[in-house]
Image (tube, helix red, strand yellow):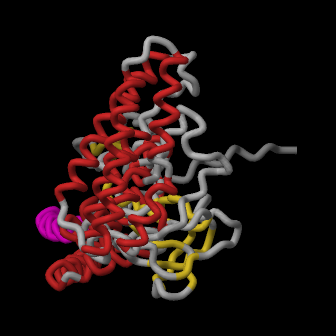
Amino acid sequence: MSISPAPEPCEPEGPDPYRAPDRAGASSPAPYVPPAPYVPPAPYAPYGTLAPTNPFAIASLVTGILCCLPGVGLLLGLIALRQIRGRGQRGRAAAVVGSALSGAGLGLAVLLLTTGATNWAWQNVKDGVREGASVSLAKGDCFDAAGDLEGVVESVLPVPCAGEHKGEVFATFGIEGGPYPGEAAVIDAAERCTGLRNTYVMDDWAVPHDVDVYYLAPSKETWVFGDRTVTCVLGSVTDGGTLTGSLRADESVLDADQVAYLKAVHVLDAAMDTAPEAAYAEDDLPGHKAWARRVSTALAGCSRTLRAHPWPATAAAPMAGFTERLDKARALWDEAARATDADAFYVPYDAGATLIEPRTTIAVREALKLATTPPDPGGEDVGDDPADGDAQV
């Protein structure tokens, strides 16, 4: 068996590209060049990056939608549009919408201010919050109320005084402004109503025994809306009680003789109201003596004023008798003011108090056509207690 010789390698036709040509044109082997290392392809880049949104455009849109600070929203929109053109930013639509809304809001605000509509709306808000409790009431007005005068009055309705009504306004005054001072401070200020009653009802005898002083005062809620008014009111102390007819008895409805008499006796009543807290002279003799001195001085002034007035013929005689009693009472109260002990105080005091008891003025009141029924002293005779202090002449 014979072995065939190995086949010779095939020679490529044409020059070998890996051989360098020799001088005769034949190719010679070229040096080996290793392949380049594999480099993975870079990740795909995005198609393009969006331009940033202008922040002023967003702020303008938000301000315009919320309708707050319309002038600021319009300004922000204009700034945004200018920056968008120069920087190629996004947000043009937001800036345009925000500017339009803010411009509309600014125009509406100017219209409301120039036409006074804001004042009208604000007044309606205040009146709604106050619910008419004290805003629309003036001196001399009568009203019905939803609520209790001793508690919370929810609303009031002015009505004619001739018919039945819940209360009658006899005075109003304001409280100093500033922050709400608190309920206790408002109540303290409202106590001034008690002293103002006599300016509206000069004759205490004309006030029914079941009528007392009340007031409508600002609350913490109404204070915020500018409510500073205290309204002084006369109302019935009876549960569910009402008034009928006006209680007004001042210079606007009384004649000159009635006014002169009431003003004179008010001086005496004011002095009687200054009685010491101690009920008996044994407990505070200096205080009772000082009180007696004040009453003696008031009696002298009252008598002098009444004698100086030109009374009509129908009242001359009763008035002369009344002033004579005042002079006698003055001497007795002056003696009580000089007492050295309680027993020495009581003797002139008792006699002097008897001379100015309410019943001693009935004749004068009849002549002057004033009320002739003394106020209810609460079941006690005026003058029995040295510290009673309410002559009511």
Occupied quadrant, residue 107: bottom left
Residue 41: percent from left, percent from top:
46, 50
- Residue 136 can be seen, yes or no: no
Residue 207: percent from left, percent from top:
50, 66
**183 on left or right of 255:** right
Chief SS of the magenta region: helix
Residue 12: percent from left, percent from top:
47, 56
Relative height, residue 53 to residue 19 (above, below): below
In percent of the image, x 40 and y 32: which residue is there?
Answer: 332
In percent of the image, x 56 and y 45: which residue is there?
Answer: 382
User: In what quadrant of the picture does the C terminus appear?
Assistant: bottom left
Q: Is residue 94 magenta?
A: no
Q: Which residues are magenta?
A: 74-90
Relative height, residue 104 to residue 69 (above, below): below
**212 on left or right of 321:** right
**159 on left or right of 2:** left
